[in-house]
Image (cartoon, helix red, strand yellow):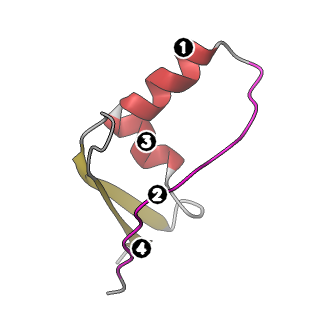
Amino acid sequence: MSTAQHDTISLERTFAVPVARVFAAWEDTDALARWCLPGDETWTSEIAEHDFRVDGLKRITFGRRG
């Protein structure tokens, strides 16, 4: 298993929806797991930890379905 540690990560993207809807999708653990899925249905992802606050910790695992 590979791991990565980031001190800071910045993402920028424009969506044609209200800001509140995008924010809610990032806050929701299930929605975030779908967002972080790196491929098609042959992949799986799991949010192991999701503290959605400034300086909060996030741990996400993903890989091919077994």
Judging from the image, what secondary structure is the residue with disc 1 in? helix
Position of the N terminus, as image quadrant, is bottom left
Q: Residue 63: x, y in percent?
A: 41, 73
- x 30%, y 33%: residue: 53
Other-residue count near label 1 (Cα within 10 Å), few / some / many at <14 / 14–19 / ≥20:
few
Three-letter amino acid code of the residue under disc 2: Thr
Q: Which residue is mark 3?
A: 32
The answer to whether mark 1 and mark 3 are in CB contact below 8 A is no
Instruction: Please tell me which residue lies in front, 66 or 5.
Output: 5
- x 56%, y 63%: residue: 38
Q: Which residue is mark 1?
A: 20
52 lies above or below 16 = below
The answer to whether mark 1 and mark 4 are in CB contact below 8 A is no
Extent of the magenta region: 3-16
Magenta span contains residue 5: yes
Three-letter amino acid code of the residue under disc 4: Gly
Other-residue count near label 3 (Cα within 10 Å), few / some / many at <14 / 14–19 / ≥20:
some
Position of the C terminus, as image quadrant, is bottom left
Other-residue count near label 2 (Cα within 10 Å), few / some / many at <14 / 14–19 / ≥20:
few
Q: Which residue is mark 2?
A: 8
Three-letter amino acid code of the residue under disc 1: Ala
Instruction: Please tell me which residue lies in front, 59 or 55.
Output: 55
Three-letter amino acid code of the residue under disc 3: Leu
Q: CA distance from mark 1 to mark 4?
A: 30 Å
Is tag 2's residue or tag 4's residue first in the polypeptide sequence?
2
Q: CA distance from mark 1 to mark 3?
A: 15 Å
